[in-house]
Amino acid sequence: WDTYPVVFAAIFVCGIGGTFHYGYSVSVMTSPSVFIKELVKQTCVQRYGLSLEPWQLSLIWSFTVSIFCIGGLLGSLTAGSLASKFGRKRCLLLNTFVAILGSVLMLLSKTAMSFEMIMAGRFFFGINSGASLAVYPMYVMEIAPRKLKGIVGVFIGSFMSLGKFSGQLLGISELLGTEKLWPWLLGFIGFTGLFQLITLFFLPESPSFLLLDRGDQRTCEKALKQLWGNKDYSREIEEMLEEKAALQSVRSYSVLELIQNKTIRWQLITVAVTFTSVQLCGINAVYFYSFDVFRAAGIPEEKLPYTALGTGLCEFSTVVSCFMIINRTGKTALLFRGYAGMSVTLVFLTITLYLQVSWMPYCSMVLIFLCIVFFAIGPVGVTPSLPGELFAQPFRSAAYTISCSLNWLVLFVVGMVFPILVEKLDYFCFLIFLFSCFICGLYMKFNVPEIKNKTPLEIAAEFDKMHCKPKREDVTEKYANRIISYETKL
């Protein structure tokens, strides 16, 4: 902290206005759901003289929740190209205005008697979260020195988990989860966005973007000095210049070109597998059944929201604990252990939920918290930063666009299909998620090298070794030649 104070300040500023918004928006809708549904019914009666049927109300509510994913997908698709064109910092600045606009709509929705404003606000929050998930990891991974890149990835997951916990905490009836204050609960992230907007002006642009995309070495060195102080950053400059020399004739790639490029096929598959599995690992199902398990264990109904706080706090504290183990263990190992642990836990959770024995709910409670711990250690702490570590500069924006778009698509599909799975399969729905965790764990074990403290060029060489490709010329020259030859074909 004392060595790189500006770097950690940038991580905090961008995190509280970045992935924090994603986590907060995911969890915040549970508490005020009763008040929002009542607003929908009153609006339809006053405006149209229409009394909604239960299925109609349920449909409007589902759309209000799910439109967040549609906005997230749109934000992910546009963030990569905007970050390449205008820069990481400027893209983050523009993104804060989207969050503030969504917050204003939320705050005015009750006064205006308009549930459509809540839908529009959720859509704008989705755009903001989608762009943040793509640009925030890109920015902080590029401003951090190599020895901090491991824990920087954990910060990304930490703010996401902190957002979830904050949404649960502020939603209790003693704070903002009341009939009078729920618009302030929904619009809270506008204030964190405003905080980011004010403070981000004092932070520099990504040095990597300045040198590799803009070709401005002088401004790059100035940004490094502001971020790292009077440290020796000659090695980092040398690595960036080496990458620039290797890729000097290569422009930034589009999403389609990245998909077609065979030179980085394994990196792309790795990103696709991990970002898909983080939504298919069953954590949402675990949270869904947690109320039933806690209720069966004898916890009073009015105390259940406070018990849910325990699950959010468990995830956040576990992600924070990753700071102490990630540099010793390695990121690939953490992902494998996280998914392997979740696989075993989901097997036993299915069994304990199925067996209706008096003491079984207590076992299920322990397993729920254990599953959250494994999820936080691996998938949450490691996955968000992977595209920035696996891909060189020309591919990075497109890689984040693909990975975040997959994340939003799968989240939307799970949100739509999960209620049907619960209705048809009940507790056995965990077996589907178990399969996803098992496959991802096996893939990480046998197909992905350790990536801790390595450059994208070094990781590309490790992938080549792991998949039995013969050694040829120097890895930097080889990597560049393969990319340039691909461009020549285009």
Image: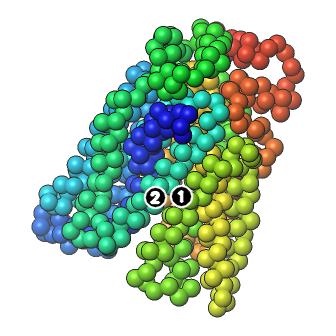
Q: Position of residue 227 (x, y in %)?
A: 49, 27
Question: Pointer 2: what residue?
Answer: 164
Q: Amino acid at mark 1?
A: Phe
Residue 64 in view: yes
Question: Pointer 1: what residue?
Answer: 316
Residue 344, placed above or below residue 162: below
User: In the image, 452: left or right of 315?
Assistant: right
Q: Position of residue 341 (x, y in %)?
A: 72, 61
Please identify the quadrant where the C terminus is shown.
Answer: top right
Please identify the quadrant where the N terminus is shown.
Answer: top right
Please say which color scheme the image uses: rainbow
Residue 378, placed above or below residue 218: below
Question: What residue is at 46 percent from the left and 24 percent from the top?
Answer: 226
Query: Mark 2 against mark 1, which lies toward the viewer?
Result: 1
Judged from the image, the secondary structure of the residue bearing numbered disc 2 is: helix
Number of the label disc, if any, that sits on residue 332: none
